[in-house]
Amino acid sequence: MKILLIGINFGSYELKIKQELENQGHIVTYMFDADPRFNVIKRLCGARMANKVNECYRNKCLRTMPHNYDQIIVIVGRALTADFLERVRKGSPRAIFKLFLWDDVKRVENFTAVRSFYEYIYSFDLKDCQEYGFLHLPLFFIEEQSEDEAYKSRKKYDVYSAMFSHSDRIRIVKSMNEQILRLGKRANFIICPGRYEYFVRKKYYQNTQGIRYIKRTITEDENYRYMKDSNAVLDVQFLSQIGLTMRTLESLGMRNKLITTNQNIRYYDFYYKENIDVIDREHPVLNIKFLDIPAKPIPDAVHHKYSLYYWVKVITGAAELPDYIGDYRIGELKF
């Protein structure tokens, strides 16, 4: 198939989607939903100039891209306009338009204006699927490690996480780090406040045993190396987030144990209490036995359907959308 993939410039994840689409035999054109310089121009020159730059970028894409696509796949696409999507449809009148939301719908400001363009809307958020009737499709893991390698190899760290310092993450990390150290375990927490914040408040961000502050995010390869070297991963999602984070799915792919503040993970079919410790966000307390009890193997059929390979199969329609929550029913879930 000929596919137009429109992303939000979120790290390398969309490029990995493009690569997997091509690996599965599709011809793919990729573009961002906004000019990659949009945020910088907006800060320096204001919203009016940034919007003009966006318009020029999208016009250039429309002029240079092929037409007659079979599918238009949009990842979030919060910067897209109805006018732009209408012009895309004119160039590909038989195309199926699909939207995948890996953000809460209330954070996608243009959703109401563009919703009618999409024949299929997928979301990683169970609550949004319940309220809006979206198709439930979680995020995916890219890097995968076999169970034997993951649990027989020697680990350098008991708990690891690399994260931006939004909301209450630093408070939670400090609390978990103290508990881990008291147990005689080894922690490796890496927190990025952002370059400007790091330099302005450098005295506040002092490294301690188990916690390191950095001004730039670590690379994807570094992240996977640290995960391979760790027994468990700590996940602290956005305060309002219901859907599973990319960190959660990465830990599933790497077969790490997981410590998470996301209470809704209990609904998913890969949830085993031996593998996942759900902690209270306000009063995070680590189960002291969790890091030492043996992990419970996840069935291959369950594990596989969270892979990028299978995610691409589903989003393109080459595979049926599976059930990710087992005996639960979305309409009956409580949030």
Image (cartoon, rainbow, N blue to C red):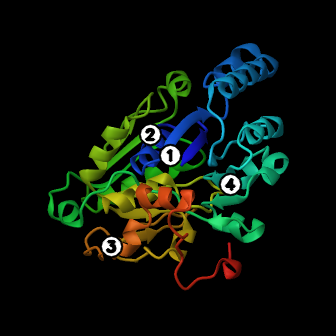
Q: Which residue is mark 1?
A: 170
Q: Nearer the viewer, residue 208 or 49?
A: 49
Image marks 3 and 2: residues in contact by CB distance under 8 Å: no
Secondary structure of the residue carrying numbered label 1: helix
Say the numbered circle drawn on residue 191: 2
- The mark nearer the N terminus, 2 or 4, is 4
Sequence-earlier tag: 1 or 2: 1
Closest to the camera, between mark 3 and mark 2, is 3
Q: Of label 4 and label 3, which has the lower sequence position?
A: 4
Q: CA distance from mark 1 to mark 2?
A: 8 Å
Label 2 and label 4: CA atoms lie apart by 24 Å
**Local secondary structure at mark 3:** helix
Query: For this rendering, which residue is in front, 64 or 268?
Result: 64
Q: Is residue 184 left or right of residue 83?
A: left
Tell me which amino acid carries mark 4: Asp
| Residue 178 to residue 324: above or below | above
Q: Amino acid at mark 1?
A: Ile
